[in-house]
Image (spheres, helix red, strand yellow):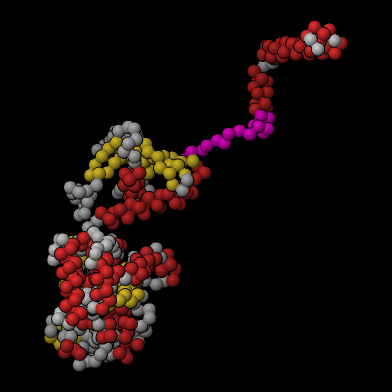
Amino acid sequence: MDLSSVLASPSYGKAAETYKKAVTVAAAAAGYAVVARTMARELLPDEVRSAARWAASVVRDRILPRPKQRRVKTLYIGRASELSGHGDNRLFWDARAYLATRIDPRAEGPLIVATGAGGGGAAQPQAPLLLSMVPGGSATDAFLGVEFTWRLVTVSRRDKDDGDGGRPSALALTFDAEHTDVALGEYLPFIMAAAEAQRRQDTALKIFMNTGWSWHGISHHHPATFDTVAMDPALKNAVVADLDRFIKRREYYRRIGKAWKRGYLLYGPPGTGKSSLVAAMANYLRFNLYDLDPSHVPSNSDLQRLLLGMAKSILVVEDIDCCFTAKSRESVAQYPYITYDDADDAEDDDASDSSQDPKPKIACVSGAPTKEEGITLSGLLNFIDGLWSTSGEERIIIFTTNYKDRLDPALLRPGRMDMHIYMGYCCWEAFKTLAKNYFLVDDHALFPEIQELLEKVEVTPAEVSEMLLRSEDADVALQGLVEFLQDKEEGTKP
Ligand SMILES: Nc1ncnc2c1ncn2[C@@H]1O[C@H](COP(=O)(O)OP(=O)(O)OP(=O)(O)O)[C@@H](O)[C@H]1O
């Protein structure tokens, strides 16, 4: 069918008629709408028109989905503690320290850069560079899927003559208000914990030694870490896991009403790394060490004072077998400075404080035996349990000995020392740690021979370390070690 016959057909004529009518109606409706709007504008008062607009918006809001409104919340963290009324607000400094690790140095805009405190608190050449926002600047951070925006704000205090005008005085933390619980319950506590961990890292550790009833501290720079201590890897992992678990259990110890303390007994031949492990534990936890020499503690009351004078820390008593024994009173002559419990007394240790024990203890102070009250093993353990149960701070006690079999059974009873750690002769795994420490090598042509020899020969990690130290050339040092082990095997070396 061509175009002329389509136009001439009756069905086309009907459709064209219908279309014309529709156009006429639409034009009339549009005209009425314009007229109605004009009339409404001219005839209806403003109040009626705005009421109509409001009604229309209510209907629209009810029927049509609207994009969700974002309510933001801002927390101001002032530099000064507004609530306690005095001093610095630690949270302000914690947040600034935390932000220093989150600021992107490549981001646009100016930043403040300064040196952080290294080792002893004073700025040191190797101290890290810390970034900070300039006043008015902002930084964003994401935590648990929530976006947080930080701004450093300056509150002008020109009206107050406190010499503080113009310094940044608060951090403003802005986030979606529906995440307020995350901000207060998780994000800020996380920041405080991170800052505390960093503070510990930056603070030089100390080791304290006792003279009489007072402690004297010096810096503790022992380089041992869990990476450098050579020991069975499974045992090492177990020690690290035990420390981690202990540190996280503040609430648990509080709930069961026990002192937040953990006891470790390290035993093994001389030179197997007991002192190195103590140092590694201190470095890992960033705890100060208190090295107690019981021979310098005249009485239980002096011991009490020493224990009360300790902060969160590790208390070490080395060579405990030389300090306390239950063997016999004849032993007094052998260990002249210390008071001894009888084995029978030790059984009652839990029930009574030995300082109130009516039986006279033999105390030998400064080599002069007297009948005065003296320090006892039960006194030490009871004091520790009693005194530390109220402090609420975590403490670790470590006893070391070369001779576990000489120890007072009271010390070995379950519940006294939580973990007994045997530091033994150098095994293959321990040797690999030492080789890595000294030469940064994981493998060497002499390793198979050394492995075979270590299975047959008893050698301490201290002896192996000494051989490895003899040359900076790994080939030379390892060859020297092979010869040393062969001599031992043949019995030509003690
Ligand atoms: N397990 C080890 N891992 C790494 N180094 C070790 C180890 N054992 C010993 N050494 C090395 O030997 C030296 C002496 O070891 P350490 O004092 O730790 O042994 P110890 O078991 O405490 O000895 P002692 O019982 O005589 O006090 C350390 O300084 C270290 O260089």
Q: Residue at x 76, y 11 (%)?
A: 23
Specify start and end residues of the magenta stretch as a single range: 59-75
Residue 287 in sight in this render: no
Left or right: 265 as drawn, with respect to 61: left
In the image, residue 170 lies in the stretch drawn in magenta: no
Rendered position, 336 above or below 262: below
**Residue 384 sits in quarter:** bottom left
Left or right: 143 as drawn, with respect to 346: right
Left or right: 32 as drawn, with respect to 61: right
Q: Quadrant of the N terminus?
A: top right
**Residue 479 sits in quarter:** bottom left
Between residue 99 and residue 453, name the one nearer to us: 453
Left or right: 186 as drawn, with respect to 289: right
Rendered position, 223 above or below 132: below
Between residue 376 and residue 100, name the one nearer to us: 100
Q: Quadrant of ligand 1?
A: bottom left
